[in-house]
């Protein structure tokens, strides 16, 4: 199966909706320009520098995933709730192009700035010193279980800060599994520990400035790059869109158990 190249519009087309509903994933090309992405990356790097100076370990109880370059310089492979710490990032995500997503999902959905893991920044690099180069199969329903919450749909909206071709690894997902039963969603694979390819999986590749969406109820994983060093660098920003009663995270709360599981298998 190939993911078509769609264009994000104020209102979704019938073709876009049909593809989304059937497969639980979709990709929109060129939602942001290269210059706009570069400005956003500057804001992310500014926030990273502040976290490095603070020697920060967690945000809203969620661990920062620290890594090092081969020459020993620190960088953050993953941190959550970015829009709660950077007004510049929050302003970018309030752009009309992103609010148009709500028309695609429905008015009951909202961008979860301080819920789930909020706005997540990922920086993938396969090299000595990097602690974050892949992530095993999982569904996002596990997050609700560990937070003691009712299972709710969560839509993952990804904005790509670099080109992300097959050689850089990236998201692999099994289309259509967003309609599986709760039991299948929780037990169909060994969460986070299993990173083996599945014959049903497809690669969610993207170019710098593209926007992707996948339903968190899909089985998905992050494949390791087949190249190493600078050629493997892949950066993206992921927004959680949710519905139902607001459930903001405690800024001083403890890390949910699923983050410890991720830390064991990265």
Image: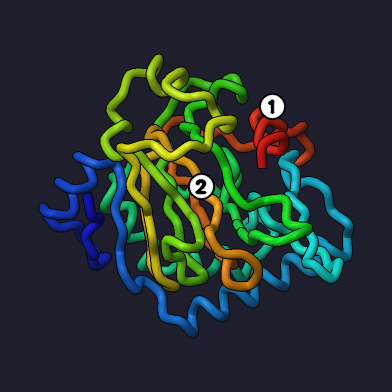
Image quarter where the C terminus lies is: top right
Around disc 1, counting alpha carbons within 10 Å, would you say few (fewer than 14), some (14 to 19), or many (20 or more)?
A: few
**Rendered view: 14 above or below 108:** below
Q: Which residue is mark 2?
A: 222
Count of residue discs: 2
Q: Secondary structure at mark 1?
A: helix
Mark before the other along the chain sequence, 2 or 1: 2
Q: Quadrant of residue 158?
A: bottom left
Estimate the x, y position of residue 87 in percent, counting from the top left: 63, 66
Q: Quadrant of residue 4?
A: bottom left
Estimate the x, y position of residue 215 in percent, counting from the top left: 37, 40
Q: Quadrant of residue 29?
A: bottom left
**Rendered view: 196 above or below 162:** above
Which disc, if any, is residue 178?
none
**Along the line of sight, the residue nearer the viewer: 118 or 143:** 143
Q: CA distance from mark 2 to mark 1?
A: 20 Å
Q: Which residue is mark 1?
A: 257
Left or right: where 7 falls relative to 217: left
Badge nearest the viewer, 2 or 1: 2
Estimate the x, y position of residue 207 in percent, counting from the top left: 40, 70
**Rendered view: 10 above or below 196:** below
Left or right: where 33 falls relative to 144: left
Residue placed furthest toward the bottom: 35
Q: Looking at the image, which residue is at 51% across and 54% down? A: 238
Q: Looking at the image, which residue is at 66% across and 53% down? A: 78
Q: Looking at the image, which residue is at 49% across and 80% down? A: 36
């Amino acid at each position: 199966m190939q993911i078509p190249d769609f264009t994000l519009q104020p209102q979704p087309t019938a073709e876009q909706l049909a593809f989304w509903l059937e497969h639980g994933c979709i990709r929109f090309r060129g939602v942001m320009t290269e210059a706009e992405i570069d400005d956003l990356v500057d804001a992310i790097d500014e926030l990273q520098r502040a976290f490095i100076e603070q020697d920060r370990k967690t945000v809203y109880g969620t661990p920062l995933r620290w890594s090092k370059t081969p020459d020993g310089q620190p960088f953050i492979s993953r941190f959550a709730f970015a829009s709660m710490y950077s007004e510049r990032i929050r302003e970018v995500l309030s752009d009309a192009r992103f609010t148009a997503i709500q028309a695609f999902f429905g008015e009951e959905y909202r961008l979860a700035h301080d819920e789930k893991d909020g706005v997540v920044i990922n920086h993938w690099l396969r090299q000595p010193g990097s602690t974050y180069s892949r992530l095993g199969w999982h569904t996002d329903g596990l997050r609700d279980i560990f937070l003691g919450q009712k299972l709710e749909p969560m839509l993952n909206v990804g904005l790509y800060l670099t080109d992300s071709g097959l050689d850089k690894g990236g998201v692999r997902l099994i289309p259509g599994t967003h309609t599986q039963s709760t039991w299948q969603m929780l037990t169909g694979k060994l969460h986070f520990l299993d990173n083996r390819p599945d014959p049903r999986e497809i690669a969610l590749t993207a170019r710098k400035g593209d926007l992707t969406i996948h339903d968190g109820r899909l089985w998905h994983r992050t494949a390791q790059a087949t190249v190493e060093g600078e050629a493997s660098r892949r950066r993206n920003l992921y927004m959680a869109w949710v519905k139902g009663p607001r459930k903001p995270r405690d800024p001083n709360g403890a890390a949910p158990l699923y983050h410890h599981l991720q830390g064991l298998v990265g």
